């Protein structure tokens, strides 16, 4: 018998409140929210933090105390052209472009809150003086790399063909998101021309062969979908689908509806930033073109992929990548406060906006899917290891083929000790 497991207001409100409280803690307060000048990702923390603050203002009207203080200090913390880090030069600094995509997104978000001319001036200067000078140069982006190694937080990998590259391979193309948001507000034709150049280059790149970062790829796809919504030009929709289909069918998504951080790198870790991106792409594809498969995936990403990502403290952390070579889901990095905790706020905004689409569809019985995983409709089931008890999901335990299975555990409801020690075996 089919049934529905709703995404309840109680769950969503609890998650949002935990996220808000985490963003009110010291790492995100005014004395720490600006990264030091030597930080290798100028503008990244600032952009992600301000965007997260704006998401909470939009979701609930709650203002993170740091937000007005941060906005008041932007002019003194940025350079003469209103962005972070060095002025644009002959060598393109990939991580600076990626970081300022988030900063552009943040400026657009706060501008929509109160239409401040200061924020319009800032975003215009970021475009004019950081992004516009790159026009005509994206075709030179190096697609043959010798150093593809990277950590949870990427780093500069060297200079090739006029690019100061990142181990977060392809992250320069993250900027499709920020620039398309800027274009939505300004309708600057120069921005659209730059976007067309970037999209044409990025779509042509073999992302699997390059071992591109899935987070930046899905973020770029979101920007393409924004352009499709704004223009109706199917080229942008097709470009987004080319990334989405590669993500789904060529090793981007794990068996738990999470992500591999890079294509082709095997067992590393998941990244909630990218899982949030995948939720947003899936819901947008349903809204824009009625893609029912994308809607099913959106539900499964929320109920399974993001089940464990939000920690008891409201932040977000990385997981093991469940695949043919790893059958156990467990916390990898307890919290990635420098990126994923902030990005999770936009995932919550997406869930709140699309709450009516995210109710899990159940069949009323546990069945194996084509991969051998145990599902009840949209809910993926696993086996809790190591004798952990007292979890809410254990009240829903069923015995199947000699295994005691439960829905994937929602970490935000646990203690820190439970979240750190929990192991769930995924059978396939």
Image (cartoon, helix red, strand yellow):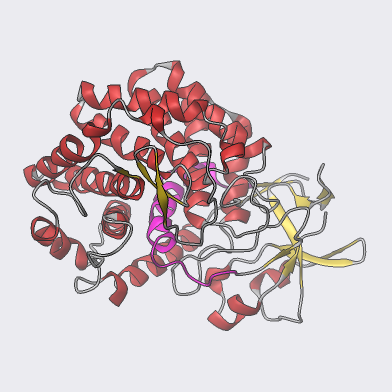
Measuring 46% from the left and 30% from the top, which residue is drawn there?
Answer: 202
- As drawn, the residue found furthest toward the right would be 402
* Residue 59 relative to residue 392: left or right: left
Between residues 381 and 393, which one lies in front from this camera angle?
Answer: 381
Number of numbered markers = 0
Q: Position of residue 162 (x, y in %)?
A: 34, 39
Q: Which residues are magenta?
A: 332-360
Whether the magenta-drawn stretch holds residue 335 is answered as yes
| Residue 414 drawn above or below residue 366 | below
Between residues 322 and 146, which one lies in front from this camera angle?
Answer: 146
Evaluate whether residue 53 shows in this view: yes
Between residues 342 and 99, which one lies in front from this camera angle?
Answer: 99
* Residue 395 relative to residue 219: left or right: right
| Residue 171 drawn above or below residue 303 | above
Measuring 40% from the left and 23% from the top, which residue is drawn there?
Answer: 228
Q: Position of residue 229 (x, y in %)?
A: 38, 25
Q: Position of residue 190 (x, y in %)?
A: 22, 23
Between residues 259 and 60, which one lies in front from this camera angle?
Answer: 259
| Residue 92 drawn above or below residue 373 | above
Whether the magenta-drawn stretch holds residue 44 is answered as no
In the rendered image, the quadrant that contains the N terminus is top right
Find residue 48 and report its image quarter: bottom left
In the rendered image, the quadrant that contains the C terminus is bottom right
| Residue 89 drawn above or below residue 10 | above
Evaluate whether residue 25 shows in this view: no
Q: Position of residue 406 (x, y in %)?
A: 74, 65
Find residue 131 and report its image quarter: top left
Measuring 26% from the left and 58% from the top, which residue is drawn there?
Answer: 46
């Amino acid at each position: 018998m089919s049934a529905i497991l709703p995404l309840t207001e109680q769950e969503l409100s609890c998650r949002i409140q935990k996220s808000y409280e985490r963003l009110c803690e010291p790492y995100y307060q005014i004395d720490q929210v600006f990264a030091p000048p030597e930080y290798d990702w100028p503008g990244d923390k600032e952009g992600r933090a301000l965007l997260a603050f704006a998401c909470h203002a939009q979701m609930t009207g709650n203002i993170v105390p740091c937000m007005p203080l941060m906005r008041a200090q932007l002019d003194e913390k940025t350079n003469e052209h209103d962005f972070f880090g060095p002025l644009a030069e002959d060598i393109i600094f990939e991580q600076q472009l990626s970081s300022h995509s988030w900063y552009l997104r943040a400026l657009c978000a706060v501008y929509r809150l109160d239409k401040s001319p200061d924020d319009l001036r800032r975003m215009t200067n970021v475009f004019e003086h950081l992004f516009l000078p790159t026009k005509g140069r994206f075709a030179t982006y190096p697609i043959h790399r010798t150093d593809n190694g990277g950590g949870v937080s990427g780093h500069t990998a060297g200079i090739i063909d006029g690019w100061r590259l990142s181990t977060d391979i392809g992250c320069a193309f993250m900027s499709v998101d920020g620039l398309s948001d800027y274009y939505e507000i300004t309708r600057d034709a120069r921005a659209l021309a730059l976007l067309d150049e970037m999209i044409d280059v990025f779509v042509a790149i073999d992302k699997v062969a390059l071992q591109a970062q899935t987070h930046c790829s899905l973020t770029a796809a979101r920007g393409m979908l924004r352009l499709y919504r704004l223009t109706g030009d199917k080229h942008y929709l097709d470009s987004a689908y080319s990334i989405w289909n590669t993500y789904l069918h060529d090793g981007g998504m794990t068996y738990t509806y999470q992500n591999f951080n890079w294509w082709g790198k095997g067992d590393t870790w998941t990244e909630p930033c990218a899982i949030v991106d995948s939720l947003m792409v899936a819901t947008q594809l349903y809204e824009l073109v009625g893609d029912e498969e994308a809607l099913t995936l959106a539900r499964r990403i929320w109920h399974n992929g993001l089940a464990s990502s939000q920690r008891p403290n409201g932040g977000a952390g990385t997981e093991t990548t469940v695949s043919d070579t790893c059958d156990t889901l467990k916390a990898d990095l307890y919290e990635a406060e420098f990126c994923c905790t902030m990005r999770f706020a936009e995932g919550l905004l997406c869930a709140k906006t699309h709450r009516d689409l995210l109710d899990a569809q159940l069949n009323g019985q546990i069945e194996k899917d084509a991969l051998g995983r145990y599902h009840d409709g949209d809910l993926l089931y696993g086996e809790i290891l190591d004798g952990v008890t007292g979890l809410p999901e254990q009240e829903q335990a069923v015995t199947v083929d000699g295994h005691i299975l439960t829905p994937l555990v929602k970490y935000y409801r646990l203690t820190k000790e439970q979240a750190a020690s929990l192991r769930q075996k995924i059978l396939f």
